Amino acid sequence: MMRGMTDAPAAAPTPAPAARPDRTLIVILSVIGALVVIALIVVFTRGEPEVLDESTPEGVVQRYAAAVIAGDEEAAKAYLVPELADACERIESAPVQDMRVTLESTTEREDSADVRVLIAVSYEGGLFGPSEYEEEGEFDLVADDGAWLIETAPWQLTICAPGVK
Amino acid sequence: MSGAPVPAAAAAPDPAPAPTPTTGSAQGTVRRLIVYTILFALVAIAAGGIAGLLERLIDAGDPLAVGGTGGLALSLAFALIGGPLAAVLWWVVWRRLRDASERMSLAWGLYLAAMYTVSLIVATTALVVTAIAGIDGRWLPGEFSTGVVWAAVWVWHRWMSRHPVKRPVRLATVPAVAGSVYGLIIGVSGAVAALGSLFDTAIRGAAAQAIAGSPWWQGLLDGLIWAAVGSLVWWWHWYRDGAKRLTTGFAAVALIVVGVIGAGILMLGGLAVALHVGLRLAFDPGDPAAEILRPLGTALAAALIGAAVWIHHRRIATERSTGTRRATRLVMSAVGLAAAASGIGVVLNATLAALASPLAASGTRTLLLGGISALVVGGPTWWLNWKPTRHVEPTEIATPGRRVYLVAVFGLSAVVALIALLVVGYRLFEFGLDGNSGAGLIDRVRAPLGVLVATALVFGYHFAVWRHDRAVIAERGLSVGRRVGRVILVTAGDPEALERAIGDATGASVTVWQRALGEPGAVPDAAAVVAALDGVAGKRVLVLAGPGDRVEVVPLAD
């Protein structure tokens, strides 16, 4: 291909510059290996999410969300306000497999509270691994005899149609 | 319209006798562009109108269903106005094609390739939809008549594209390549759907699918019909029309992009999903097995069919030329690299997800196992194609393919890393200003952070390789890239043999400038021209070939 251009120095292959990418490669492969090992350890040793106090708004939201994700609608209904739970017109929540709910912030007032959460859903992505999308959601809670009950939930986690008396 | 052949082009004196001297003039180019665009539109309109009329003819049985006369009026207008106009314009065009300069025009080749491909796609799609509905017991006269009319359009354009005299000189092989690519795509999709449905039934049992709705073999049959039609279209263009043996640039690009990259992604994607399912069954038993197994059938089908298609095309690509062989290796290593990098990003993402305590979650393991399967499939693919430990010959280091690959990979990874960095920064500032919980912050940055780290690793490695390559090139004084970028060939007579010989020998693109002198004259031997070009370097090189044996090679200034 490159005939007649560089004939003279072709005899002595210089090994020195070839070592550089090799070292880079070893470093990068070790980083990847370490990353995978740490990930396996962390993910497989991590237990259930830390349980929050049931008397707080976030504790109620946590139990409700866990029940919906587990598919236990009866248990979830126990955390809804009676107007919603008693006349519950069941609607199907969004698919809850591979869903993850993280607490963003809580605003607590005397007789109501807002709990903002981040809802992340991952889905199969073929060759390039799973992908995720995330969305913010907000729970509205009302105080009820020292406990908290959920009035509205983000649509992904709603199991009773709102506004039905 | 029908009297004089060219009412608009008043400047053209008399189109019938002698080759017109306006070859390649701006006016001629614009005229042809407009004429063929109008012809394309008129043929499409006429075909739509005739299909509409045919549908009413076939479906005359139920007059109650006719909702107003608007549709009929439209079909009549399209067929009765568009049809004759299309016929007249075609007749004018067809008469002019006796002229060699018309046959050599780009517009004629482009028109024929476009209409050939469009009519093929419309006809096969409509006929397959009719067949599938027919099996289901429904009769779709609209689809059927569309299919029949467009099939006629296809036959007509196929006849023109193979006409012994008037077929186009340029882009003459594009219809065969486009047809083979289209056939391959629908054939493979159909085959994956059919085989996937079969595997699915076998894996999960017929009962899982047959709770309600159409029987399990419905999906299989639909897929088989698409696969059969696609294979026929592909076989026809690939073997009968010889798209397999074409060595044009377009054919090479189609071979690499569809046959190697497309089929490679299908095969590796199927493997990655199948591996993910296996890992989830073994290590993540949270979900019911039926749920986990759902994607397995299609994944196995994609892996098998993708592998068959990939092996077929890779063999052709490795045998065709050094360029396509290197390109095959490079694109496969790019696919593997992208999958592996994406997998690393997902692994880091899953680690952070496990570290940040969520309120409620169903499985970080699924995410981690998905990342690991992408890494396990992509990593070896990259390793086997790139072979990072081998000693690279200096001549290979200087090839444009390798240089372009390195610059593209580290350029793209730098862009992706920059975007990920901006997202991470945005999230951090948002957190600082809003004061949300720490878990929320980690959840928001983990995905872009994973991408950032993965692309940084990719960037680091390829940047090091690129710098090493550059050092070798500087040290050895190698010239990068092809020696001749473009050859301007000035010749009389038929330039085709010379053009091909120069292109094959130098890899340069060749522009032909015909001599104004009318006499055809003897053209020098192709071997003599190639010999004269030996050792010549330059971005643009002028080659004067003929008359007689005269060959003059003039490298031009940049």
Image (cartoon, coloured by chain):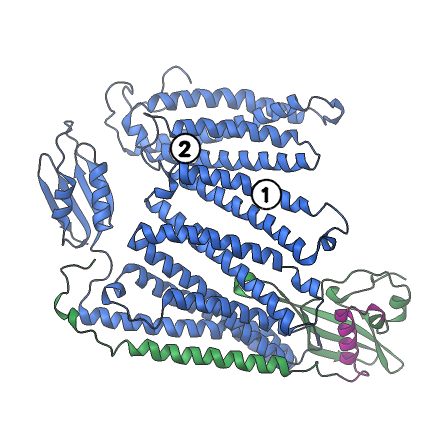
Q: Residues within 10 Å of mark 2 (few under 14, many from 20)?
A: many
Residue occupying the point 23% across, 27% down: B21
Residue pointed to by mark 2: B112
Residue pointed to by mark 1: B224
Which one is earlier in the sequence, the residue at label 2 or at label 1?
2
**Total number of numbered labels?**
2
Chain letter, blue in picture: B
Residues behind callouts 2 and 1 on a single chain: yes
The secondary structure that dominates the magenta segment is helix
B230 in relation to A12, above or below: above
- The amino acid beneath tag 1 is Leu
- Distance of label 2 from label 1 (alpha carbons): 30 Å
Q: Position of residue B183 (x, y in %)?
A: 49, 42
B107 in relation to B423, above or below: above
Q: Is residue B240 left or right of residue B298?
A: left
Residue A64 lies within the magenta run: yes
Q: Secondary structure at mark 1?
A: helix
Q: Is residue B433 visible?
A: no
Q: Position of residue A55 (x, y in %)?
A: 82, 83
The reply to whether dot 2 and dot 1 touch (C-beta < 8 Å) is no
Q: Residues within 10 Å of mark 1 (few under 14, many from 20)?
A: many
Q: Quadrant of residue B295?
A: bottom right
Chain letter, green in picture: A
Q: Quadrant of residue B432?
A: bottom right
Residue occupying the point 63% across, 25% down: B55
Magenta part of the chain: A52-74
- The amino acid beneath tag 2 is Leu
Q: Chain of mark 1?
A: B
Q: Nearer the viewer, mark 2 or mark 1?
A: 1
Q: Secondary structure at mark 2?
A: helix
